[in-house]
Image (cartoon, rainbow, N blue to C red):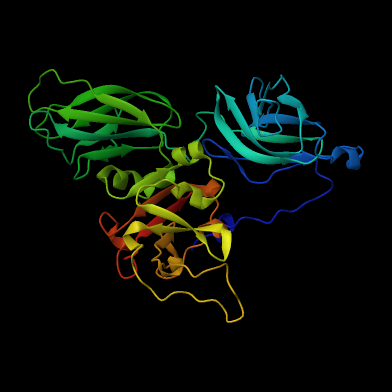
């Protein structure tokens, strides 16, 4: 049963007399939404609200895990009222504080960066002088969401074919895992550091290699075995980021096959979408349309279904509508799954993604224009307009 409480955007609730107001969630670049705690300050409200007068705001940046202040954070505030160049820069002091003393009332983009923390970006609205607190998540502490481990494939040195049934164990222990029919294996829940990994299979010369594991990252390896005791090529190693939930859902394996289009959490954080449909902007084979009855709401249409003719939606007799009729209602809309459960059946009704999915809780998205590459459990009647799979962070 899907927990819709984490997918629904909560209403804005105002308390006291806030001085700076957050308009949308501030998305931290590895896993945590920035939170702004807004503090009231005394003063003449009438003079503070005059839009032409510069005001002063004070921010404090803390560690999302420990709550300690972070010194040396580079702070960039971008917007029309942020100085003559449209941006103001500051750096946090030993108490994690920074101050912007000449900013106009208006909307701004906040960017935070630090060598030991995941970058964070977000939007906020300055209404009056005041202060706020926000947080950054440290690198290498994403064990609750990011996978730390080794993923690899074992092949025959001579033929290059993938080997199934290879025993892969850590150190001198006898417990381990076996490579599957694709020659792939997974060692997860590891700690960072150097690990000795042993590979053995009847008919092949065993080998052992030292592999360095980075906290919060997956080390991907390619290993070859030989039937003869010869000098083997070194293991090919690469490091990447993987979300635990996406690994368990088979997201990365499907991404490797080349079918469909994929957006992982790292790309979501780099793009910093304010609405769910922003993730589909510019994606090949995907179109975005504005709702004729509400131009602020966007619909996702896969081009595989854009020529499907369905019964158009009609307005009430006494409703003149937004203007001349449009064929948007004749589009064919994709089916949407959230964490494996149907959230929208698709067809002639659009999925209003912006109203019930917050991109801040999304771990990954898969888009399939047809049944090609679509996992069998999601195939069947109703997928002729395409399918979107959304996986949330848990």
Residue 364 relative to residue 60: left or right: left
Please, is residue 98 above or below residue 256 in the view? above
305 in relation to 204, above or below: below
Nearest to the observer: residue 129 or residue 59: 129
- Residue 87 falls in which quadrant of the image? top right
Above or below 232: residue 328: below
Q: In the image, residue 74 lies at what x, y percent?
A: 62, 23
Q: Position of residue 363 (x, y in %)?
A: 46, 46
- Answer whether residue 394 is visible to the viewer in this image: no
Question: Residue at image x 34%, y 68%?
Answer: 308
Comparing 102 with 34, the one in front is 102
Name the residue at the bottom extreme: 317
Left or right of 116 on screen, residue 156: left
Q: Quadrant of residue 385?
A: bottom left
- Residue located 90% across and 37% down the image: 42
Report x, y in % for residue 360. 55, 46
How many labels were placed on the picture?
Answer: 0
Q: Is residue 64 left or right of residue 366?
A: right
User: Viewer-proximal residue, 40 or 300?
Assistant: 300
Residue at (28, 27) in percent of width and height:
197
Q: Is residue 5 visible?
A: yes
User: Going by the image, does 48 lie left or right of 382?
Assistant: right
Name the outermost residue toward the right: 44
**Residue at (27, 29) in percent of width and height:** 221
Residue 391, image x and y in percent? 44, 52
Q: For residue 263, which quarter of the picture?
A: top left
């Amino acid at each position: 049963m899907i927990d819709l409480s984490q997918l629904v955007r909560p209403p804005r609730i105002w308390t006291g007399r806030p001085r700076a107001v957050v308009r949308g969630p501030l998305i931290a670049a590895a896993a945590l939404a920035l939170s702004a705690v807004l503090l009231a300050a005394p003063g003449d409200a009438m003079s503070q609200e005059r839009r032409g007068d510069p005001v002063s705001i004070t921010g404090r940046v803390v560690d999302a895990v420990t709550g300690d202040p972070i010194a040396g954070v580079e702070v960039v505030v971008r917007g029309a009222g942020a100085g003559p160049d449209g941006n103001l820069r500051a750096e946090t002091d030993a108490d994690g504080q920074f101050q912007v003393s000449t900013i106009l009332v208006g909307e701004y983009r906040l960017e935070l960066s630090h060598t030991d923390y995941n970058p964070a970006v977000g939007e906020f609205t300055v209404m009056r002088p005041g202060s706020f607190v926000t947080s950054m998540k440290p690198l290498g502490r994403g064990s609750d969401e990011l996978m730390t481990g080794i993923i690899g494939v074992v092949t025959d040195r001579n033929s290059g074919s993938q080997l199934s049934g290879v025993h892969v164990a850590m150190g001198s222990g006898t417990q381990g895992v076996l490579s599957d029919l694709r020659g792939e294996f997974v060692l997860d829940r590891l700690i960072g550091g150097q690990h000795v990994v042993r590979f053995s299979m009847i008919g092949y010369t065993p080998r052992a290699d030292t592999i360095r594991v980075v906290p919060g990252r997956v080390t991907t390896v390619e290993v070859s075995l030989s039937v003869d005791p010869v000098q083997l090529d070194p293991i090919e190693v690469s490091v990447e980021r993987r979300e635990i939930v996406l690994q368990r859902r088979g997201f990365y394996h499907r991404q490797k096959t080349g079918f469909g289009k994929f957006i992982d959490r790292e790309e979501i954080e780099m793009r910093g979408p304010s609405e769910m449909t922003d993730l589909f902007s510019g994606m090949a084979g995907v179109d975005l349309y504005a709702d004729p009855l509400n131009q602020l709401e966007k619909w996702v249409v896969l081009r595989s279904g854009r020529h499907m003719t369905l019964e158009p939606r009609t307005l009430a007799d006494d409703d003149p509508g937004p203007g001349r009729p449009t064929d948007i209602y004749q589009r064919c809309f994709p089916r949407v799954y959230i964490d494996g459960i149907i959230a929208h059946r698709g067809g002639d009704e659009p999925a209003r993604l912006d109203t019930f999915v917050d991109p801040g809780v999304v771990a990954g998205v898969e888009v399939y224009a047809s049944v090609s590459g679509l996992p069998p459990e999601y195939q069947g009647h109703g997928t002729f307009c395409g399918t979107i799979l959304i996986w949330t962070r848990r």
